[in-house]
Image (spheres, rainbow, N blue to C red):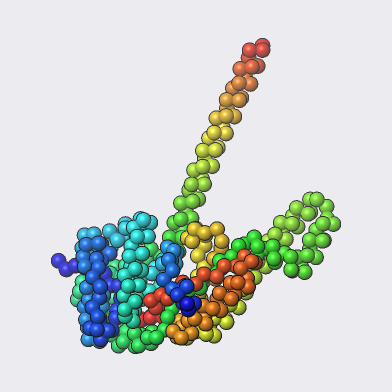
Amino acid sequence: MSERNEYANKEVGLIDVLDVVLDKGVAIKGDLILSIAGIDLVYLDLRVLIASVETLIESNKETAAQLSSKQFDREKEELDNVIHQS
Amino acid sequence: MDSLIYLYGVIPTAEKEKQDIPAFKGIDEEHEVYTVSFGEITAVVCNLDEREYGQEQLEKKTNNPTWLHEKAFHHHEVLMSLYAKYPIIPMKFCTIYASMDNLLTTLETHKQRMIEVLESIKGKEEWILKIYCDEDKVKESVASYSDVIELRKEEIAAMSPGRQYLEKKKLGQLIEQEAHKQKQAFGETIHQELADMSANTEVKRNWNKDVTGRKEEMCWNSVYMLEKPKVDDFLKRVKAIQNEHGDDGWKLEVTGPWPSYHFSAIS
C-alpha cells in the first residue's frame, strides 16, 4: 500500500475544513455582491474568546455573591450572639 | 426577481463534457447544483432564494456556529466530490453572486487567468501540514538542555527566599521565550526540507486553542503543492519525522489531497 492511501481521504476535523474554506479559497474581489467578511476565522476566534471571558466573569460574580451573603450571615450570627450574651 | 447564485468552483468545459457532474442538492438543501459553461470554463453553481440568503440573512446565519459547521462541511464535500473528477478552482465558502449576469461578467473578466490556473494545477496536489505540540514537554526539554537556564537555576538557589520568588518568575518567562523559539525553529526546519520537494508552498497562521478546541498547541501550519509522483516521498518523510520526534511531544498532522485552495489565486 502506498503512503498516500494511508493519508488520503482520512476524516478531517472542522478546523481543517474552516482553515481552507474560510481562510483560503478563491475570492474574486470586486465582483462579489455579498461580502462574507463577517465570518473571518480571526473574528470567530475572538467571538469564542469573548464568550469564554463572559462565562468567567459570570461565574466569578456568582462566587462573589455567595461569599458576600455567607459573610453577611456570619456577621449577623456573631452580632446575634453578642446581643444574647448581654 | 433573479435568484442569487452560489459558486462552488470552476472546471474545464472539456472535462465536464467527458462526464457530467453528479446530481446533488445545493447549500440550501433545496435547489439542485448545476453547471454554466462559458467557453473553455464551466462554473458549478446553485440558485439561492434572496429572501433566505441576502446579505443580512447570510450574516445572521454565519453567526450561528451550528449552521457554519454544517454548511462549511457541505461546501467541502461538494468540492471534494468535484475534485475527484475534475481539475477545479475551488471558491471560498459562501461565494455568492447577486445574479447570473453578475456571475457571467465575472467569468468573462477572469476567463484567461482561470484557464491558466486550471492548466497550472494539473498533475499537482495540495497537502497541508499542521504541527501540534505538548507545551509542557517543549518547556521541559528547553529547561533541561539550555546551559543559560541551568546556570540561572543554580544562581537562584543561592538567593534569599524573597528574591528567589521574583527571579523564578523571570526564569519562567525566559523558558517561555526559549520554548517559543524552539517551536518556531522546529517548524521552520521541517518546512525547509518539505519545501524543497514542493512546487509551491505557503506558511499559514497558527490557530489558537479556542479555535482548534485541542489541548495541544498548534505551532506550525503550512501548505505544499506537490507534483503527484512526489507525494509518496513527501508523506514518507513526514512519517519519519513524526517517528523521530513523537516522544518529545511533537505531533505532525498531514491532510490532503485538497482542491487547490491556496494556489489558484485569480486576482
Specify the farthest residue to the front.
Answer: A1
Q: Give the camera-side residue of B263 and B172.
A: B263
The image quadrant where one finds the N terminus of chain B is bottom left
Q: Quadrant of residue B242?
A: bottom right
Q: Nearer the viewer, residue B156 or B125?
A: B125
Residue at 38%, 81% in the rendered image:
B264
Horizontally, residue A6 falls left or right of residue B73, namely right
From the viewer's perspective, is residue B11 above or below residue A37? below
Q: In this view, does B103 lie above or below B94?
A: below
Give the residue at x 66% y 11%.
A86
Give percent across and percent down for residue A49. Answer: 48, 55
Residue at (51%, 45%) from the top-left corner? A57
Q: Tally the numbered discs.
A: 0
Could one spot residue B181 in this view of the protein?
A: no
What percent of the width, then of the height, locates residue B62?
34, 59
Question: Where residue B192 sits in the image (x, y, percent)?
Answer: 57, 81
Residue sticking out furthest to the right: B158
* Residue B70 point in image, percent of width and height: 34, 60
Q: If the image is split into quadrants, where does the C terminus of chain B sit?
A: bottom left
Q: In this view, does B209 lie above or below B126?
A: above
**Residue B211 showing in the rendered view:** yes
